[in-house]
Amino acid sequence: MKLQAPKGTRDFYPADMALRNWIASQWVAVSQRNGFAEYDGPIFESLDLYKLKSGDEIVAQLFHFEDRGGRAFAIRPEMTPTLARMVAARANALAKPIKWFSIPRLCRAERPQRGRLREFFQWNIDIVGSDSELADAECIFVAVDFFRALGLTPQHVTVRINSRAIVTGLLESMAIPADRHAGVYAALDKRDKLSPEAFDELLAKLALDKNQCAGLVEIGAAKDAAGLAAIADRLADHPAGGAAVTRLRQVFDWLAALGVADYCAFDMGVVRGLAYYTGTVFEAFGRGGLQRAIAGGGRYDELVSQLGGPRLGGIGFATSDVVIQDVLTEFDLLPELESVLDFFVIDADATAFAGVLEVVGRLRAAGVSTGFSFARQSINKQFKQAAGQRARRVVVVDAAFADARSVEIKDMTTGVQQRLGIDELLNDPLRKLESGS
Amino acid sequence: MKLQAPKGTRDFYPADMALRNWIASQWVAVSQRNGFAEYDGPIFESLDLYKLKSGDEIVAQLFHFEDRGGRAFAIRPEMTPTLARMVAARANALAKPIKWFSIPRLCRAERPQRGRLREFFQWNIDIVGSDSELADAECIFVAVDFFRALGLTPQHVTVRINSRAIVTGLLESMAIPADRHAGVYAALDKRDKLSPEAFDELLAKLALDKNQCAGLVEIGAAKDAAGLAAIADRLADHPAGGAAVTRLRQVFDWLAALGVADYCAFDMGVVRGLAYYTGTVFEAFGRGGLQRAIAGGGRYDELVSQLGGPRLGGIGFATSDVVIQDVLTEFDLLPELESVLDFFVIDADATAFAGVLEVVGRLRAAGVSTGFSFARQSINKQFKQAAGQRARRVVVVDAAFADARSVEIKDMTTGVQQRLGIDELLNDPLRKLESGS
């Protein structure tokens, strides 16, 4: 019987795992240097938590199950509900702003397709407990800091930024009733993926008139500073919308001060589909053939209170290992990841083998990676095995080990050989050899 | 509505996460220095995979569910089936011995109790594709290497080692039929947790006679080298059992050569409950009040072929974050984990704030962790915030930044202040300051 990994999931053999770990290590490093602390929650949560945030429709997209007590759970499809739950539970005790990151494993019961698997890893960055536009700027800066760390330049990636509050202002100024706004956000979010006809059809379903539809198409095309100026003019008589423009301009100013203006652009086309965004929204797009959002997020000022906590403004974004791997592949930026051994210990003949184990045990205890052969075989074959495992240095244990406690060490890169006492070697295994070769 | 983490699972707030990450980092470091490569599989597998290995009874212990296509899956309760499946799928291509480790998140639908949660993390070490007793010794060495890394001495932890092949030889020499062996292994495995009466009852259920029962009790008490010698005598007329004793003695010899004999002891009481062990079995026990296995494993020479691959001998062990945390707590060996910031950048007054953002952006891009305040407030308050975030150094951006591009830097430990040009600072942010203070 041959069994495979479930469709839409991945086996991570060592080379795959090394790449996954490398991406995660970049996430950790960028998070920490930006002052974010890591958190995590359970892999499954109460099914109610997801219903509460996203409605009953969400259930079909989840892997859900019951325990023996009949309680309903689901494997987490996203991290935000867990974050909001954890923040709500300790809302008073946590110092604000809460700057947290997480690298959750997530599952969605969807049909697997390019860039969307049933199981994947996300990087979540969140700043909770601050309404400042500096939080918005910092959050976007973290995304750019990560792109730069990968070698992605403004030629590779653009962060398109908008504000839900501006969109809301425009809808209000066009007299589109509030109960249709969520539908319009969802329609605008899908616009890039739809033909003009399909988009018009979506708007017609929302019972918008021709002028309103034409207005929305025109608005959606506004881009860059000129586009934002035109939007500001439209909102001249709408105080809340005007304030939202002023706020977004401040975000752009802070992004410029942080040195990442060249990655960032205003784009009315970015609205984000989720209902809970309240202010700044943004998506990073690969500029190559990929043409897909590779990260996205926004401000959610009501979410924590919606999930049982006090009112705490927040902003966050997420990206996944799958899209990051895709974009790095497209731009040929994947790193070479080679596992190496610091040492490989061999015997000059089988009588010296107990000494091999002693040296192996002591080198490993000293913290350096060390291999040896399970098979007693010729020096040549052992050297070959060392090379196969990409050992940097080979330690030969011979008759002199029993008498003089010394070993022969060969640097596999330079070919230089030297004899060292075992205690001398163990005193500082790596440095001793750097200077010796 | 207040929602909590599901019973038997944990929320990892930053301090909890730091500890979990620290334990995992020890697992990674010890694995790598022993030459093991990391792998992983999906969080859920086909339900059949677990039934195939453990029988239909396992289903009640799993969180299982179906996808929309009616395929049955379960969240992984252990890693070994995934390992065997992955190895079987590439059995010919993988270089032997396969030395792999994994740090899987696992879930079991059991009643939560001390040391047993519904969700936990394991460390799995496996050597597959070698029948050598050196693989057995290396596997046990890795466990000890980890204990030593944590500061656990032979006074804290003992690794009790036995061989299934010896137990089988003894059962055969006592004329206990092969179809009852699995039952006897399970009974012997539970012996320490049972009263003598309950143990006798278990044996009686296996239809063993009085002599056989008495023999098993006596056998189970054999310990250390003297105990192994007595067992060897008993097996004088049983060639396979005798060979198993010789092999186990060789394992002890190699463990001594590797320098970890003081952690290791023969113990006939260690049998392991799982049906699939075929040779060396071992468990590490905390020697304090805990008196519980904190790691366990053994040789499984038929498992890969049972799950669809070729015959590949293997040996492995596992431990969990929960028991490791318990044992470290008991012996007061938990580390102090403090998150710190390399820099906190403040303004001398609000007009200098754009400069703060420039310095923050450049320090972070240079790879050093850097914080700043979202609120414009007095120097004193900003210093307080820096101290609250345990910043090592505070950078003050004042009027001189606009003119001379210089900043004032205060070492928060020594109190030493110095003025540096911003480019000079960025050239090597950490070293410059070490030497300057």
Image: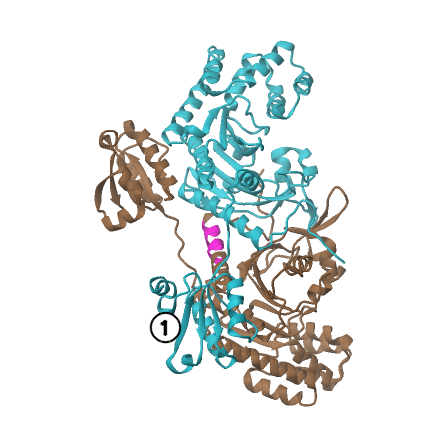
Chain colours: A brown, B cyan
Which percent across, then down, holds residue B419? Answer: 37, 73
* Magenta residue check for B413: no
Q: Nearer the viewer, residue A307 or A20?
A: A307
Quarter of image, res A59: bottom right
Left or right: A370 in relation to B122: left
> Which residue shows up at 48% across the image and 33% down it?
B314
Q: In which quadrant of the rendered image does the N terminus of chain B lie? A: bottom right
Left or right: A163 in relation to A355: right
In the rendered view, tell whether residue B388 sits above or below residue A414.
below
- Amino acid type at circle 1 is Leu
> What crowding class fits label 1: few (fewer than 14 Cα within 10 Å), some (14-19), or many (20 or more)?
some
Which percent across, then down, holds residue A427? Answer: 30, 42
Q: Nearer the viewer, residue B219 or B371?
A: B371
Which percent across, then down, holds residue A388? Answer: 34, 44
Badge 1 element: strand
In the rendered view, tell whether residue B339 sits above or below residue A97.
above
Q: Nearer the viewer, residue B140 or B224?
A: B224
In the rendered view, tell whether residue B405 sits above or below residue B227.
below
Left or right: A111 in relation to A328: right
**Is residue B68 visible to us here?**
no
* Magenta residue check for A21: yes
Q: Nearer the viewer, residue B381 or B236?
A: B381
Secondary structure mostly seen in magenta is: helix
**Chain ID of residue with mark 1:** B
Count of numbered tags: 1
Which percent across, then down, holds residue A170? Answer: 69, 83
Q: In which quadrant of the rendered image does the C terminus of chain B lie? A: bottom left
Quarter of image, res A247: bottom right
Residue at which label 1 appears: B420
Which stretch is magenta?
A15-23
**Is residue A113 visible to us here?**
yes
In the rendered view, tell whether residue B229 sits above or below residue A304.
above
